[in-house]
Amino acid sequence: MKLLRVGTAGAERPALLDQDGVLRDLSAIVPDIDGALLSDASALDRVRAAVGAGVLPALDPTGLRIGPPVGRIGKVVCIGLNYHDHAAETGQATPDEPVVFLKAPDTVVGPNDTVLVPRASRKTDWEVELAVVIGRTARYVDSAEAALTHVAGYAVAHDVSEREWQIERGGTWDKGKNCETFNPLGPWLVTADEVPDPQALSLKLWVNGELKQDGSTSDQIFPVGEVVRYVSQFMTLYPGDIINTGTPAGVAMGQPEPKPFLRGGDVVELEVEGLGRQRQELKDA
């Protein structure tokens, strides 16, 4: 299933994109797309039954905003330097263990919402990523194979970053990762049963129509199952939590001088195979 949330920010309602590309209203079946739904097998079965019965009303998508596909996110866990080619382009060694940092849930916006370039920013950068959505509590999971059973589905994430603040200002990466609007998510949550191999997905990103990133999750240093297993040793993952699993080569930071960092007026488009496409116009904060 392709689950999504539509409507104005803070007042989104649950919806589904059916196999014919028709947007369907789920609000009579479930209250929201969130951790409570994703952890409730019977509720998901009701959604599937309603789809099969053809009883879900259609929604007119004209002018209808798409919000983040998951509501009430508890935490956003991010994995840095998780692609061989990205580590190489930035001149950093392949990590022996996953690099873990957090983004605040309030950085998450819809896939086509405006992204704000922070005041005084000189090095705002792009990163297309595969996002993992947790569907079952993961605590001290003992294998990568078992970890995949805790995944509800997958989505497109844009891990926007301010590199000067991330790398050159001391302390942790958090200053360069938690600016408002720095985590567009969606358009859909594609349930795990429709993604048989999360290590076989292409990722692409364009800036002002120019292809910048063109990679594959097959290049991940730590695959999805291992990432979930590893993170579960250090923190409990709850239904509705998000893991951004890293970005392939092609970010502005890895390009020759003058590096083409983002500015107000730029347009970024990105997609992950089978998971939909995002488009953001950047504006100065």
Image (spheres, rainbow, N blue to C red):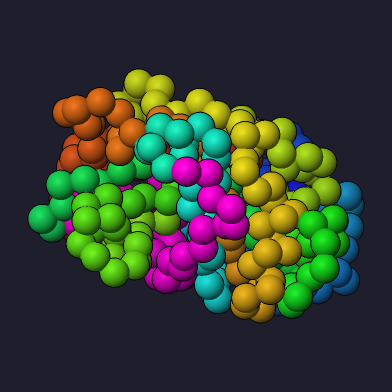
Is 157 situated above or below 71? above
Depth order, front residue of 152/71: 152
Depth order, front residue of 184/139: 139
Residue 56: where, in percent of width, then height? 75, 54
Is residue 285 rendered to the left or right of residue 199? left
* Residue 257 visible at all: yes
- Any magenta on residue 173? no
Is residue 144 rendered to the left or right of residue 164? right
Highlighted magenta segment, given as a residue range: 93-118
Depth order, front residue of 189/174: 174
Residue 164: where, in percent of width, then height? 21, 52
Quadrant the C terminus occupies: bottom left
Which residue ends up furthest to the left in the rendered image?
120
Residue under the point 58% across and 63% down: 242
- Any magenta on residue 107? yes
Residue under the point 17% across and 28% down: 258
Residue 14: where, in percent of width, then height? 62, 62
Is 55 situated above or below 282? below
Residue under the point 72% across and 42% down: 198
Residue under the point 40% across and 32% down: 89
Residue 191: where, in percent of width, then height? 75, 52
Depth order, front residue of 34/65: 34
Is 103 situated above or below 86? below
* Residue 185 visible at all: no
Is residue 183 rendered to the left or right of residue 98? left
